[in-house]
Every structure is written in C-alpha cells, then in structure tokens.
Amino acid sequence: MALYVQKFGGTSVGSAERIKNVARRVVETAEAGHQVCVVVSAMGKTTDELIDLAHELSPDPSRREMDMLLTAGERISMALLSIAIIELGHDAVSFTGSQAGILTDTVHGKARILEITPTRVVEALNDGKVAIVAGFQGVSTKKDVTTLGRGGSDATAVALAAALKADVCEVYTDVDGVYTSDPRIVPNARKLAKISFEEMLELASTGAGVMMSRSVELGRNDGVRIHVRSSLKSTEGTWIVSEEEIVEKPIIAGVSHDASESKITLSRVPDQPGIAARVFRALADAEINVDMIVQNSSQDGKTDISFTMPDIEMVKADPILDALSAEIGAEGVRSAEPVGKVSLVGAGMRTHPGVAADMFDALSAAGINIAIISTSPIRISCVVAREQLHDAVRAVHDKFQLGG
Amino acid sequence: MALYVQKFGGTSVGSAERIKNVARRVVETAEAGHQVCVVVSAMGKTTDELIDLAHELSPDPSRREMDMLLTAGERISMALLSIAIIELGHDAVSFTGSQAGILTDTVHGKARILEITPTRVVEALNDGKVAIVAGFQGVSTKKDVTTLGRGGSDATAVALAAALKADVCEVYTDVDGVYTSDPRIVPNARKLAKISFEEMLELASTGAGVMMSRSVELGRNDGVRIHVRSSLKSTEGTWIVSEEEIVEKPIIAGVSHDASESKITLSRVPDQPGIAARVFRALADAEINVDMIVQNSSQDGKTDISFTMPDIEMVKADPILDALSAEIGAEGVRSAEPVGKVSLVGAGMRTHPGVAADMFDALSAAGINIAIISTSPIRISCVVAREQLHDAVRAVHDKFQLGG
C-alpha cells in the first residue's frame, strides 16, 4: 500500500464529464489498495470569471476579500469531485485549505505555506476514504483565508505530499510529461523518463510551462518524488527526483525557451560607481522583475547597459526609464526590442566543459546572433532576436542529439 | 449609535449592479454613525446552478459534500459586497459562518444553530468596519461546514442579531413589508406598521411568504426586533415585535392563503381504535407532512377520514395510501382534490369570540363551501375549493374591513 497525492488542474475538472473522468482515475488508484489524497484547482474559467466580477465593483479590490472570493472556486470543484467519487462507490471527503491544516503567512494573494498539520486528512485516509483537499488556499496565522498565488495548487500538492510523507506526488496535466523541448517547435522532442529537481528548476524558470519553479523547489527541499503525467492517458510521465535517483545521467536534460521578454538598452551611460544600482533599484521599487543584465566595457567614460524584462511590464517601466535616463545623464533609452531566450539545461554540464562552446557553435551555424548570455552551473541561456527563437531551439536541440 | 443587522437575499445581490446598490444602502447606515453587520445569501440562481451540477454527478449526492458545495455561494456574494463597500470608502470585512462563530449541529442540509460566538464580528464592528457574514451556513460540532436549509439566511440574521444584542434586524426583501393580505389578490390590502411575533408566526405558517416561521420564532425567543422592508425603497416596512410593544392592538392582523395542498379522503374506514394512528404513522414514516385532519362522526361502524397535504408529496403518498386503504379495510381512497386554505390571524381573537362566526358568514355570503376548519387561539383556517380561494380571501378581508 502506497500513499499517493494526486493533483488535478482546472482543465481536468472543467465540466461534470471531466470530473467523472478524474473520479474514475482516483478510484482506480484507491481500489488498487492505495491511500489517495487528491488536490484540485477551481473548475476551468471559474477563477477568471470571479476576478472579472470583482473588477466590475472595484479597480483595485481588497486582497483579503479577493482571497475570500477566489477560494469559492476550489470549494466547488472539490465538493463535486467528492460527490462523483462517492457515486462510484468509494468513500470520499473534501477539506478546505484550513480544514487540511495548511497554515500560511498573511500576504493575501500570494501567501507562503508556513506549516501543514493535516490531522483530518490523515484520519480520513486511515478510515479508507479518499481525501480531497482544495488547492491554492490556506488559512493565515490571523485566521483569514489566503491564496497561494500562481501555481498555488501544485504548491499545495507538493507541500501536502511532504507533510503526509507520501510515496509520490502525481501532477496530472494536459501534456504527457517533461520533454527535451517543446514538441510544437521541435517535432522529434523526446519525453524524459526522469529529471532531477535542479534541472527541472532551471527548465521551469526559463520557460518550460509544465510546473512552476516554486513547487519544484518545495519538492527538492523535502525530497518529494513528483510524477508529472497526462490526465487523459495512463502511460508513465516524467519523474522529478533527486539526482542520486537517476542512474543513467545524460549530459543534457533539455532545451527551454521564452518569448515573453524585451531587451532594453540604456546607451552611453556615465561609467561611474552607483549608476547601475540606481537603475535597478528604481525598477525593483516598481516591482518590475529584470531578468538578464549585461554591461559593455567602458569607452571614453561611457558604457551601454542592456537588460531584459517581461513585455507586459513595459508600460510600467517606460516612464521610469525615461526619467532615469535623464537623471543619470545617459544619451537615451534605445527602444525596447522583443527578444527570445533559448536555454540549455543539464546537470552534466558541471563536468563537461565543452557544452557552452557547442551551443554557441550551433547558433552560429544557424546564422543566429547572440545578444546576451547568462549561465548557471547547469544552464546556459542565450538571448536572440525573437523571430529567430524557434530556429535557435531546433538548432541547439539537434546539436546535442536530444531527439527521439 | 445603534447596532444594525441587515439581511439581503439572493435577488438583492443578483448582479454587480445590485451589489453596488446594497453597498450604498449599507454605507448610508454606517455613515449615519451606526454599527452594521450584514448577512447575505448567495447571488441569484447560484445555489440552483450548483445543485444542478451536483445532480449531473449523482442522483443522491452526499449531504456533507452538498453543504461544502453550496456554501461557496455566500462566499462569493459576501466577498463581492465587501469589495463594493470598500470601494465606496468604508472599511469592510467578510466572515464565513465558521469565522462568525456560528456553531450548528451535524445535520447536513438542515442544520440547527446551537450557539453563536461572534468574537471576530464584534472586533470588526468595534474597529468601525462593516462586518459581512455569510447567511445560510455554519460549522458543526465536528468542524464540518453545514447549511441551515430553507430560509437559512434569515435565520442567520436573526440569530446573529440576538447574539450581538442588535437594536434591530432589518430583513430587506422585494416587497415593502407585511400586508393585511396578498396585494396581488386583494388590491386594497394595507401594509402593517407593526405585527406581533405570534401573529407573524401564524401568517408565515399559513402561506404568507415574506419570512419563514423558523426565523420569526428565533426572533420571538430572543426578543429580536425585526424590520421587514424593501431593498428598493427607503420607506419604513413592517416591524415584527413583541405584543407589548404594540400600543394600538387591532383585532385582526391579516388574511393569508395557501394554494399548494390537496385534500385526500379515505372513505368508509372501520371506526376502530388505532386506525387513524396507523394511517398517519405510515405517512410520517415517509416524511410526508400532513396539515389538517378531520374525521366525520361514525355511521354504521364506518367513518371518513379527510386530511390535507402538499400537492408535491402526492406522488410519494399515492402508493402508501393505496396499500393502507386495503390493509385497514377502507372502501377506497377518494381521488385527491386540489384545495385552498384561507386563514384569518389576529391576537384580538382571544378576547373577541365572534370572529369565527363572522368569517364563516363572509364565506357563506360569497357562496363558498367550507371543507375543513382548524383553529389556534389567534387563527382560524378554512379549507375551500381551490378555484374559490381568491374570492374567499377577498370576502374575509372585506368582512373585517382590513383594506386601506
């Protein structure tokens, strides 16, 4: 008998028909003699519809009340799933984040889990029931309802799996698992059987959409084995596990990409101490996340500072950059350029020094110019022109023979 | 400074526009220097839609899970109302039944309130905030979410008003108040300025739809002054208060009616002890509510038993009655007859013995035959043919000169 945590997203529970499918899936695992704790998101578009309603009432709704509002979503999906499971003849019981003992801090809208005391969930499991827990939500130290922000349901599932000492946390999604690259761009991309937490973290933070870094990090910290798999097929997906569990270690795990950033250049900035700090402090104060930064070597006491940031932050950033540019005596903000970022991720890089050179070769051979480079011990990212991004992904994927 | 509990039903919060109206209404009271605790129902058709979804999954969904499901409805409306009030510049905070300290028994779907400990509500009010509490819901002694059944939001409001020692419990509705009769049937029906709990109880239990008996009873037991008024106009409605508070006591409060029952006759039943008990025990076991019962005097050892019950229970009752009829040796179930019940209510009846005779006169003068009569110290009800019901109501209303 194993203990499974199974997480189903909003699409998987988007209609009565789909909820029945999920129920069958859950009951299969339970009837095979396992303990099952299910974590669900709100149905399909429920969250978006509730947000729209709130915005009809206020341009900037109270965050506490937004959390109260949005948590109605999982309450609906979890109760319906419970009803569907009971209808199949297996006992089930649903719990809110609060009832499941998910204690968070008091930051409404993006609370962090502080502690999980899943007493009632354990009782239900020991009684042979399927326990269904609302994803995305908890209760704060002030006893207010909180939500965990983007990717919150995955975070609930992984943290709960850790607290329950589950054998596995299964994350059901609309793709089969984690691929060496996006199959829509690289048709021969291969599904990975296993990937390490570290590699998955790098892929997630550079554009792979399967899971958010936050949940992978939770899994790594608590050693929760995560199985990302399809909610439609019963084939194995991808296991995210610790590096030691991976016997045959390939050098490269995969190639990720991101087409949502722009590159800004502040040109001919006086090359003095403190200038860069002022620029990035001003952007940070406006809660704008700057991704990659590069500063050219100084010529005649002037230098160019380039950096990338999300396209959607440009509206907010533009006036700040114009003001800054004048303030620090730069010659101007070069107009923002939409760029793409291709990233190569693999734990084997640590011991194989030629990887970066091979990647640059591949891009060069494909006639693609590199604007910015950044690296971590197990990742190399290159910023390229956005219209060349897909070619870049394919070139790098081919070069390292990652295809199936 | 007074403490108001204001209850708004599902229609009043049925859209963003209506929620804004309610918010303005609440803020008006708050800005006049009063403390305001608001109780809300789920938006418009939300509850029905959720019930439909559940029935797509199971013909007989788990009651615990239904409660989990349906309580999402008030969560949505209360959070939205809170957002709308804050947008108007007044601070507000919403509480679930559990957060408001509404403790119930464990009977899912129709839980009874055991105790209210509204610590957080009191804190919010003392901080100058509008406190918004989810109607219709509580938390059971087993820490499960419960719902209070039909009329549950009114019950929440009145019980909360008692716990908070509120000066008044305002029940906002789509009518102006309590009338001497239904204005759709009796055009000159008059709005009552005041009515006693006892009279309101009798009216509510005999067809007046404004409030359910349950909440009126809660109000009576705890001496909560209830003000039933329109959510669209700012005119005074009807105050439901204790009899001592009513200075000018009219003999009659009003005439109510009910057109939802059928009359069944078991004919030529052996007139032996225990027969009636068997009939009504069998119906009670099937959870069928029998209303009025009449047994004719015996002739040649046989008697007729007639009684009324809700039309909608007929499907369930038919086979039971057929079986019973054979079992007890009755000559047959006379086919059910749709009937109407007209009731005259007034505390003055206790001291004015001629009231019943006047009522029978009025019906007789209108050519209306009475099938069954039942009385309480402050009520007389007559069952008549359904097609004569409206005429009966008007005849009685006229006879006692209740019109405006």
Image (cartoon, coloured by chain):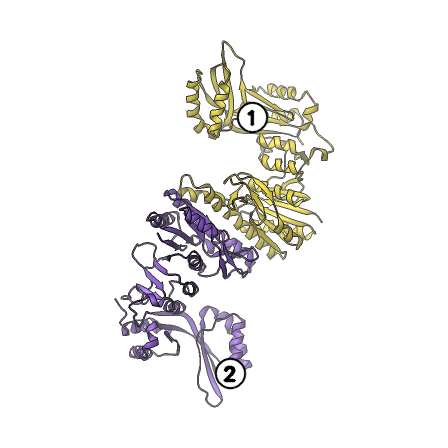
Chain colours: A yellow, B purple
Residue that numbered label 2 is attached to: B330
Locate residue A346: give its quadrant.
top right
Residue B20 x %, y %: 37, 47
Chain of the residue under label 2:
B
A103 shown above or below B233? above
Mark 2 residue type: Ala
Mark 1 residue type: Lys
Residue B217 x %, y %: 42, 65
B211 shown above or below A93? below
Taking depth in this image into account, of B96 and A321 the one nearest to the observer is B96
Say if labels 1 and 2 share a chain.
Answer: no
Residue density around tag 1, few if under 14, some if 14–19, many if 20 or more, within 10 Å: many
B196 shown above or below B297? above
Residue A238 x %, y %: 66, 38
Q: Quadrant of the C terminus of chain B?
A: bottom left
User: Do tag 1 and tag 2 residues touch (Cβ < 8 Å)?
Assistant: no
Q: Which label number is shown at residue A341?
A: 1
Taking depth in this image into account, of B194 and B182 the one nearest to the observer is B194
Q: CA distance from mark 1 to mark 2?
A: 88 Å
